[in-house]
Image (cartoon, rainbow, N blue to C red):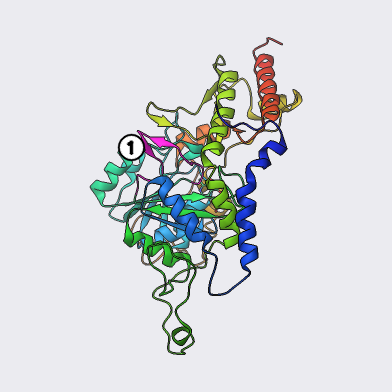
């Protein structure tokens, strides 16, 4: 049976390992050039859990993707295909590399990026695709990998919202060239903020690790405790430390300690979300105008949240949300605006010199981030309701009751 805490105390009680590892870091003390190696343990355990060779921890699930782009050599003049319905991070990192985000529309039933739309957008400048496992559901990875193979594109899976989701028996994040996860506070496993990249490629692993920490010459593809070269070398004014450009996306050891404890009970944390989602599915099963995100056969959803489409013109999004609250439920989130309709994109408030879209190094057709760009997305996004799945049992029950009463109300049964 799924782990499903009854009380806030139950929610917190299995945290002994998190406390123990955090204490270990504190007891070790703060040092500049050495550490108790918790990041290394986290990376090794994460790579093992997902069955890949390499994992590289970061301080966010944004930094992870930025490092992936760098490792893949994406830069000025390149195009990267992304979905429009995702956290801004997915498109922002492309711009931070001075590459052009190109938005591919969604499948109206799974709400995930539509491979047919990706195919239509390929140009000689396309270099990568970042498919997002939206809300915890894999996109159609076979179709995406086929396109990538045909056009020699790098695939970076954005799995910030998808831990232990499966696509045709394979773990989401292990199918593309690199998989990126977030440990931000709302995610299946968290340490407040953080993230990790997994890959089977030594070349990408090294590139990602360089992106993570200033391309220090001491870094390799493999996980290692924080160590610096001997003092005679690093104190020498002639010491060449930096092999390329890189950022500081290091995950502090103390956060890695909490993440390691969470990773050890990831199965429970995911099965809990699935159990909460199953409750929502039961509540809406007979309602024709609330349509859940479609889970195709052979996919296993990990339910970062349970998302439904309000598929009727009779009831507005706000009316439904307000009614749920009126019946004692908690307010429901709407979906993010399509990213290209955010003011940052509408007014191209990027680096202020027209880049990346009007960059002299970009020879493609400048993207027009205007309404109408992705019609399916624009149709469904305003009508999506995202139900939280990290509720203790009585809270979930209250939410189910409120949703159930709201449905009955609108169907004239109450
Ligand atoms: C799909 C998606 N991608 C990327 C991110 C960015 O992760 P982070 O907040 O850890 O930077 C998030 C969430 O925050 C996300 O939901």
Element class at badge 1 = helix
For label 1, being within 8 Å of ligand 1 is answered no
Q: Position of residue 311 (x, y in %)?
A: 54, 23
Residue 318 falls in image quadrant? top right
> Where 249 sits versus 184, above or below?
below
| Magenta residue span | 160-176
Per the image, is 360 magenta? Answer: no
Magenta stretch secondary structure, dominant: loop
262 sits to left or right of 154: right
Which is nearer the eye, 141 or 124? 141
Q: In this view of the protein, can residue 175 be seen by the observer? A: yes
Residue 135: percent from left, percent from top? 51, 37
Left or right side of 129 for 135: right
What's the residue at 71%, 25% (across, down)? 398
Q: Position of residue 120 (x, y in %)?
A: 32, 42
Quadrant where the image shows the C terminus? top right
- Residue position marked by numbered label 1 in the rendering: 116
């Amino acid at each position: 049976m799924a782990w499903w805490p009854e009380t806030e105390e139950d929610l917190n009680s299995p945290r002994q390992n998190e406390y123990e590892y955090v204490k270990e870091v504190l007891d070790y003390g703060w040092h500049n050039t050495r550490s108790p190696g918790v990041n290394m343990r986290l990376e090794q355990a994460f790579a093992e859990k997902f069955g890949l060779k390499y994992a590289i921890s970061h301080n966010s699930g944004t930094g992870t993707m930025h490092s992936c782009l760098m490792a893949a050599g994406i830069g000025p003049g390149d195009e990267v295909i992304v979905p429009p319905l995702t956290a801004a991070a997915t498109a922002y990192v492309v711009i931070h590399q001075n590459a052009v985000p190109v938005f591919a529309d969604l499948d109206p039933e799974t709400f995930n990026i539509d491979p047919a739309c990706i195919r239509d957008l390929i140009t000689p400048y396309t270099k990568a695709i970042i498919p997002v496992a939206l809300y915890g559901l894999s996109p159609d990875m076979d179709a995406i990998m086929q396109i990538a193979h045909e056009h020699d594109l790098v695939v970076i899976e954005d799995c910030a919202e998808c831990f232990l989701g499966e696509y045709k028996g394979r773990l989401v994040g292990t199918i593309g060239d690199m998989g990126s996860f977030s440990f931000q506070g709302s995610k299946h496993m968290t340490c407040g903020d953080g993230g990790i990249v997994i890959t089977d490629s030594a070349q990408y692993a090294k590139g990602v690790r360089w992106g993570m920490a200033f391309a220090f010459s001491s870094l390799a593809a493999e996980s290692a405790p924080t160590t610096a070269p001997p003092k005679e070398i690093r104190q020498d004014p002639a010491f060449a430390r930096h092999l390329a450009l890189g950022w500081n996306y290091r995950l502090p050891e103390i956060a890695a300690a909490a993440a390691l404890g969470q990773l050890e009970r990831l199965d429970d944390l995911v099965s809990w979300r699935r159990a909460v989602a199953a409750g929502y599915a039961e509540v809406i099963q007979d309602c024709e105008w609330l349509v859940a995100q479609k889970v195709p056969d052979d996919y296993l959803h990990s339910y970062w949240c349970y998302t439904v489409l309000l598929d009727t013109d009779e009831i507005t999004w706000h009316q439904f949300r307000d009614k749920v609250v009126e019946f004692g439920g908690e307010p429901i989130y709407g979906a993010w605006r399509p990213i290209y309709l955010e003011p940052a994109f509408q007014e191209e408030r990027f680096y202020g010199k027209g880049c990346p879209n009007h960059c002299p190094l970009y020879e493609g057709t400048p993207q027009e981030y205007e309404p109408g760009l992705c019609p399916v997305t624009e149709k469904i996004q305003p009508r999506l309701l995202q139900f939280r799945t990290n509720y203790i049992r009585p809270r979930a029950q209250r939410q189910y009751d409120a949703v159930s009463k709201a449905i009955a109300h609108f169907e004239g049964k109450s």
